[in-house]
Every structure is written in C-alpha cells, then in structure tokens.
Image: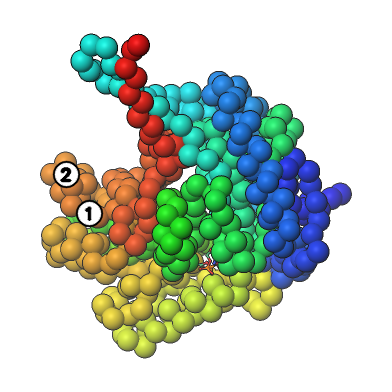
Amino acid sequence: MTRYPDLQVYIGGSWRKTKRSQPVLNPADESVIGEVPLVDQSDLDDALQAAADGFKMWRKVAPRVRGEIMVKAAALMRERADEIATSITLEHGKPFPQAKLEVVRGAEFFEWDAAEGQRTYGHVIPSEPGIKYMTLHQPIGMVAAFSPWNFPMSQPCRKIAGALASGCSIIIKAAEETPAGAMHIARALQDAGLPPGVLNLVFGVPAEVSSYLIPQEQTRLIAFTGSTAVGKHLTGLAAQHMKPVLMELGGHAPVIVCDDVDPIEAAITSVSRKMRNAGQVCTSPTRFYVQEPIYNAFTKAFAEHAKKIVVGSGFDAGVEMGPVANHRRIEAMEMLVADATAKGARLLAGGDRIGNRGYFFAPTVLADLPDDARVMREEPFGPLAVINPVKTLDEAIEKANALPFGLAAYAFTRSSRNADEIMDRVEAGNVSINTLEASVAEVPFGGVKDSGYGREGGAEGLSHYTVVKTVSHRMM
Ligand code: NAD
C-alpha cells in the first residue's frame, strides 16, 4: 500500500519533478519517507507565467462559480480525510485522529472563504446629482505565500482559500518538512476543476524562493506564516518593493487563571490544549499566571496530568502526543529547561527527550521561574509550559503584556468584571476566556506587536486579498 505520496510540484496545472530534491523524514522514527522536489529559478519563472495567466482568467470568473469549485475541493478533502491524515501523521508525527481533525479544519477554511468571496461588497457613496461615487473590492493580484510545517494541511488551506475566494492567483511555497499536506490540497482543487495556473504549489530553498518571488512585478501580496525573525526579514524585503504583507508570526500566549475558578478543571483543560501538536502551535497556551490562593492546587494538577499524557507514534491507539518536528526543537527544549532550572525554576514534569530514535520529548512543566529565565521571553514552540503565581489581576495583565508578542491570550474566570478587564487590556489579536480555542474559520485570526500584521479568516480575512478601487462617474 502506498501510504505516502510521490512528491511533486504543481505548476500551470501539471505535476512535475525538479532537478534537486531533499529527503522528508518521519519524525517518529527518523526514517526517510520521501524526496521533496526543490524548484530552481526556471521552475519559478514557469510558475510566475502560469500565475499571471491564471489571474487574468480567474478574476473574471463569477465569485459564485469560484465558490462552487472551492466547496467541491473541500468535499473531496473530507472524502479523502483518511488518506490525507495518513500522510500528515507520517510527515509531521501528530496523532492520526488529530490529523483528521486538521483535514476537516482545512475544509472549513475553504467553505467559509468560498461563501465570503461572494460578499466582497463595495459601496455606493451618496453624492450630488449627476455624479456617482462607488467603491469596488477587486482581487489584489498574484499572491506569493509561504506556509509552515506545524499544520501541513490547514496552514496552506488558509492562504489558498483567501486568495482563490478573492479572485487572486497564488504561488505557494509550502513547508519542505511536510509537503504532502499541501499536495493533497492541490490535488483536490485540480479534481474539483480549478483552471490551470490559478494555484501553483512549489517547494524549494526558502530564502531562494522568497527573494526571487517578492520583487517580481506581478507579485502583489506576500502572505507568510512562521517565525517573527523570518517575518521581519520578508517584510523588509517586501517594503523595498512596496508590496503589502500579511504576516502570521510567533506567539508566547499567556493564560491568566483567576482564583474564582476550579483549579483542577482549569489545569486539566490547559494541559491537553498545551500538549496538542506537541506544543508546536503559535497560539499554544504557554505562560500561566495563576492567582496565589489556587496556585498550588493548579500547579500540582497540571504537572500530574502532564505526566499522564501518552506520548508515541501517531498511528498507535490512545497516543495523545506525537514527536516534535525535528532535532532543532529537541535542542531548543533542552536548552530552555537547563537554563530555567539553573536559574532556580522547579521542574515538575518531563524535561527530557524520550528514547534516542524519533524526536519525542516529554510533556514538560516548569514552575516558579525567575523573570530572566529565557523561556519566559522566548517562544518554546514545543511541549513546555511555565507556571508562576500572581497576587492580583493587574499584575497578571501586566505580565501577560510584558513580551513583544501579541497573538493569542487566554483567561479563566467566572467574574464578568475580570473578563471585561481582560478583554479590554490584554494586548493580543485573539483573547479567549474560559476556552482555549483561539481560531475557527468564522473568526478573524492574527496578531499585534511582533506577532504580525493582518487577519486571516472571518469577515475580515479577504480584505488583504482585495484592493479598494474608488470610481467617480459623472453622467454625460
Ligand atoms: P524558521 O524561522 O527557520 O522557519 C520558520 C518558517 O519560515 C519555515 O516554514 C521556513 O521554511 C520558513 N522560512 C525560513 N526562512 C525563510 C525565508 N528566507 N523565506 C521564506 N520562508 C522562510 O523556524 P523553524 O525552526 O522552522 O520553526 C520554529 C519557529 O518558527 C518557532 O519558533 C515559531 O515561532 C515559528 N513558527 C511559527 C508558526 C506559526 O504558526 N506562526 C509555524 C511554524 C513555525
């Protein structure tokens, strides 16, 4: 049985291999499962030409018809969920049931944007007799998009859906570490009848691809999800060529736990959410600030439940957490734990790699950390939570806002007064109270401060993929 697809790039409606490639590893056992083709400039030139032709044609297709193709592609993704999830678990490591949920999530992004694309309304602006002022929301043009490895399917879905629903064409460089997820999206769109050139999927050396695509005349938007450092670099490059950007970057999400909630219930909910995707989520709840009266109970329950998380191969029944993506993440976890414990933090769970084959790292909990521990400022992007006590809500909000990040933030409280303070004062693009869900298709998602610029999803999501044209029409 072929469990992992033969990897290819998709340019101008055809699949192709390229001259270069690099291996794709299964993070659960470090075996090679495929060879991802890497494009060179001539492949990118073909993609640029295809995307230019694709845009000319796609912008004229009625939004309803675009939506129908997208909805059909989403239905195919749902139908193929087992096959797609198998690829994702192989290349990424996450438990198979979570990979299936990711496929559904990707399909939901398509379905939402397919409908939103039919509502990119302009205005007719009241004016003096004889002249009419109008605004039209037109597709911005060709999008150069870059998606990361943590959600091989839903991350590229976000960007492809936004572009297609708005009438844009797109060249997306998906993650070389997890290429099959994006390939399945392109296949579904091809099978749903997407005309050639509208979507072009490439893999390559990231810096080579971005530095070639961003300056091109027909590139009209740069959409990136990844680290803040790379996001700043690409934003600088885009600025030199006056290109707008949509940047979904890193986070270091605070969780404020007020003393009016059940500490055990809050801890159990928090542990499972923290360890989802082995903590490799930009919205992962990470910095817990717990009010003193419930601090000990919360911390004890959190550590106990972290120890119970079943870690293993994503295909094994009952496994709750798979490996981290690569050896770099293991090294990052080890460094952050060593630094924090050397500075006096208490290690309550985990702290070590599990075994020496496959990138497994134990769910890790640190408490009572000094402010100068690196993990208090650096996003761990792994299965590591930090818990500190706070006296007051004011202190918790001050600490939540102390970092340059502002993507997701969470709180547990029964008090509507506390909730009101939190939603008003916490600096984050997405604030969730008594839930650790931060992003579903129907709500806008994105950051403030170093966590990026712009919103994906919700009613706001397509605004970046469109430009407002003002028309003044004097009647003759
Ligand atoms: P990294 O900074 O090396 O890469 C992050 C992403 O950017 C990768 O997908 C990579 O292919 C891409 N990239 C790197 N250089 C690029 C360039 N010059 N042009 C275009 N794309 C480029 O980090 P990493 O070790 O792969 O991942 C760890 C860090 O990435 C984490 O600390 C986290 O902040 C961030 N990250 C964030 C998200 C997110 O959802 N916001 C997702 C994945 C990774």
- Cα distance between the residues tagged 2 and 1: 10 Å
Residue at disc 2, CB closer than 8 Å to ligand 1 = no
- The type of residue carrying mark 2 is Asp
Q: Position of residue 29 (x, y in %)?
A: 71, 69
Q: Position of residue 14 (x, y in %)?
A: 78, 43
Q: Along the line of sight, which residue is nearer the eye, 134 or 319?
A: 134
Above or below, 206 against 336 in this view is above
- The type of residue carrying mark 1 is Val
- Report the residue that reaches farthest toward the right: 1
Mark found first going from the N terminus, 2 or 1: 2
**Residue displayed at 28% across by 16% down:** 131
Instruction: Provide the residue designation for mark 2.
Output: 420
Q: Along the line of sight, which residue is nearer the eye, 408 or 182?
A: 182
Q: Which mark is residue 254?
A: none
Front: mark 2 or 1: 1
Q: Along the line of sight, which residue is nearer the eye, 28 or 12?
A: 12
Give the quarter of the figure containing the C terminus. Answer: top left
- Where is residue 136, by image quadrant? top left
- Where is residue 161, by image quadrant? top right
